[in-house]
Amino acid sequence: MQAHRSKKLLAALCSGTALAVSAADDHQDVLAKLHVPAGFSVSVYADGLPNARSLALGDQGVIYVGTGREGKVYAVADRNGDGKAEPHQLIASDLTMPNGVAYKDGALYVAAINRILRYDAITTRLDHPPAPVVVYDQFPSDKHHGWKYLRFGPDGKLYTAVGAPCNICNPDQDIYTSLVRLNADGSGLEILARGIRNTVGFDWQPQSHALYFNDNGRDYLGDDAPPDELNRWSHAGEHFGYPYCHGGDIPDPEFAAGKHCADFTPPVWKYAAHIAPLGMRFYTGGQFPASYNNQLFVAQHGSWNRTDPQGYRVVLVKFGADGQPIAEEDFISGWLDKDGAVSGRPVDILTLPDGSLLISDDKNGLIYKVTYQGKGH
């Protein structure tokens, strides 16, 4: 059996078409279906994390894991350096869809629908987590597109977004369909942009420090429209089109009357329709080949009502010398079989200090670790 696995590993690394599988890994049935570029391998970093979604890196190598409907927040860490985390520790439970997690100055921040919570000095209190401090609790409580992504920006402020409480509608409160930021203590809430249906992933481009974010397009305009979007925010007051215009040039059949698509900020990149782009990271690690530096990894969660499913992969959006996206290519595929069966759904991406990537999977309750062993460091 060991000889067979060794041959499989060697063939995978050489061909670049099959996943390199370690004999020590669990979940072989899922891993064996995946495809990665030559020189890369994927293992299971952590399991037993139902509905694992957003990831945040804390001190001492601790990874914090938000969930959706599971209502829990976990902490995991690889303390013995074997490439796989030890059994998780439960940080919080009975929260309302605590998808977003962020870490700063020893504290864990958790976004749970209408509020942001803070768990102080969490690294030293993993075994006995403290009661949370409420940082902000004035967001809408709608569960439809209500779960939030949460990150600290280069300016030290907390960024999140408030989705549309519907598939397609024109909410009467400005806070809906918005990108917002606030101070770490919950003060100074600003609405930065509107016209954003549902973003559950964003990151800052390393060179320009510009904020890029994904947006999930509306349903029921057909299998191939509208495209999901990668957008670039540049100034306060920007409007990205929803619900009037989709993908930069598709007027909405219900809400476009009297509106012009040219009046809204178009996406900088159009994904295929319904692939549900979620977590995203510009690669700044030192482990992968130089061609990956400052390029964008995107987790495509996958379509839920398309006739033929698509997505269910991690892609690389490549940026040119001018800082604009120019191409999209598969990085990890195989969670979607040719017959339409789904074996996993990637959600978020995190770069570790050693340059490897972590990818969460809410269908399997897993976190994968992606490493590079080939030539060309």
Image (cartoon, rainbow, N blue to C red):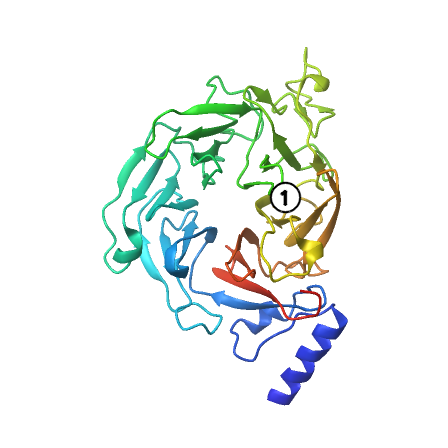
- Residue at the spot x=55%, y=36% of the render? 199
- To which quarter of the image does residue 13 belong? bottom right
- To which quarter of the image does residue 97 belong? top left
Near mark 1 (Cα within 10 A), the count class, few <14, some 14-19 or many ≥20, is few
**Which sits in the foreground, 88 or 350?**
350
Determine whether, in the image, residue 352 is placed left or right of residue 93. Answer: right
Determine whether, in the image, residue 277 is placed left or right of residue 329. Answer: left
- Residue at the spot x=61%, y=25% of the render? 242
**Which sits in the foreground, 360 or 209?**
209
Q: Amino acid at mark 1?
A: Asn
**Which sits in the foreground, 94 or 290?**
290
- To which quarter of the image does residue 11 belong? bottom right
Determine whether, in the image, residue 209 is placed left or right of residue 334. Answer: left
List the residue tagged with mark 1: 305
Placement of 60 over or under 25, stated as above or below: above
**Where is the N terminus found, in terms of image quarters?**
bottom right
Q: Position of residue 337 (x, y in %)?
A: 69, 61
**Which sits in the foreground, 253 or 233?**
233
- Residue at the spot x=66%, y=50% of the render? 311
Q: How many marks?
A: 1
- Residue at the spot x=69%, y=83% of the render? 7
Q: Position of residue 194 (x, y in %)?
A: 55, 23
Q: Position of residue 354 (x, y in %)?
A: 53, 62
Q: Position of residue 106 (x, y in %)?
A: 32, 49
Placement of 374 over or under 233, stated as above or below: below
**Where is the C terminus found, in terms of image quarters?**
bottom right
Determine whether, in the image, residue 18 is placed left or right of residue 56. Answer: right
